[in-house]
Image (cartoon, helix red, strand yellow):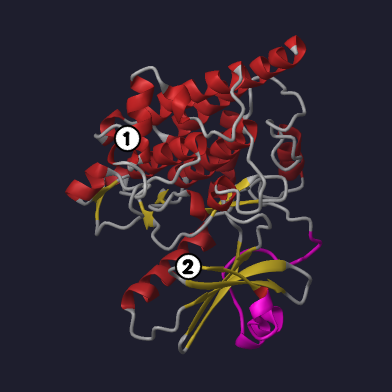
Amino acid sequence: MNAARSVADALVSCFTPPEPEKNSSNTFNDSSASSSGSRQRRNSNQSIYGSSNGSTHSREPGSVKFTMEEILKATKNFSPSFKIGQGGFGTVYKGHLEDGTMVAIKRAKKIVYDKHLGVEFQSEVKTLARVEHLNLVRFYGFLEHEDERILVVEYVAKGTLREHLDCVNGDILDFASRLDIAIDVAHAVTYLHMYTDHPIIHRDIKSSNILLTENLRAKVADFGFARLAADSESGATHVSTQVKGTAGYLDPEYLKTYQLTEKSDVYSFGVLLVELITGRRPIEPKREIKERMTARWAMKKFLNGDAITTLDPRLVRSPANNFAMEKIFELSLQCLAPHRKNRPTMRKCAEILWSIRKDYNELSTSDEIQE
């Protein structure tokens, strides 16, 4: 815990903005993210990376082993009315623990002889038990018994970022919210990469693995593919491993060499930034050939001085939005460099995004005055 707190303090000082920002929809106005909120948490001996979902529960996160009886009670015997999601891993249910904590319960598919599923489950348990950050989904515990593999994690109310970009519920994410989400994700991945015990590579940064809270704060989820990074103290520069991830987000150098580094997450983050600006999925098979790979199409438009045509048509075209779009695309281009040595670190990405948001806020205020 001391190691975690030391990196926490370092990151807070790194990511605290140079001057106070106005309390608007495109700033960190949540007390859990403000510098004053951080001070309160440090003073009360709590990890600044602990997040609150508004409940008064007493259960602390960690590798708690749940019983099947507790899980069945929490989900009312896996009631269909409690089902909130379905994925490659299995089914996700909403549940209530006895102490009032609302949780998400991930129940793996019952494939007893699937060794890969078992490996991914253990990877997620081990990774989640190690980390705690405001922008990472909080881990409460797990159950592994006979043919049942279950993860109990924080319930995040507003679904995935991809659902919001698709306007599944009819709500459109404005530009300011998208910029905030990018910063939240950058903070989370920076924390993983700078984790003092041993850096962690997520390996599956994508919009469907980013969950949004009621006030649209982002939390990175799904650590099934996560790997410990190379031990830099021993002189290692990468981890050689089987390629894992999602088509459209995969680092081309990793695909070619099987060498995994933190810069593979940076590449995926570059794709995510393009996704936030355009609203499109990384691969759009129904579009004409030159537009099917969204990042490639958007970067070509940007380099040709025609970036504005890639902006999500549901977003307002304004001087502030246009400025931020250009700056974010500049960062995306760096993240998407074919060779990892030419990509920035996630910490640098976060710093650049902070700077973009500061200028964006000033331009937005200027736009409002002129109107």
Q: Say few, some or many: other residues with alpha carbon within 10 Å of mark 1 (under 14 / 14 to 19 / 20 or more).
A: some
Residue found at the far top of this picture: 370
Residue at horizontal 45 percent and vertical 87 percent from the top? 147
Q: Position of residue 355 (x, y in %)?
A: 56, 21
Check if residue 30 falls in the magenta segment: no
Q: Mark 2 is on which residue type?
A: Gly
Left or right: 320 with respect to 34? left
Single out the mark in the foreground, 2 or 1: 1
Q: Which residues lie in the magenta part?
A: 55-81
Disc 2 from disc 1: Cα separation: 27 Å
Instruction: Give the answer, above or below, for where 237 lies relative to 102.
Output: above
Disc 2, SS: loop
**Which residue position is annotated with label 2?**
87
Q: Where is residue 50 in the image (x, y as percent from the top left)?
A: 66, 52
Q: Looking at the rendering, in which quadrant would you find the C terminus? A: top right
Residue found at the far left of this picture: 257
Disc 1, SS: helix
Left or right: 344 with respect to 53? left
**Which residue position is annotated with label 1?**
296
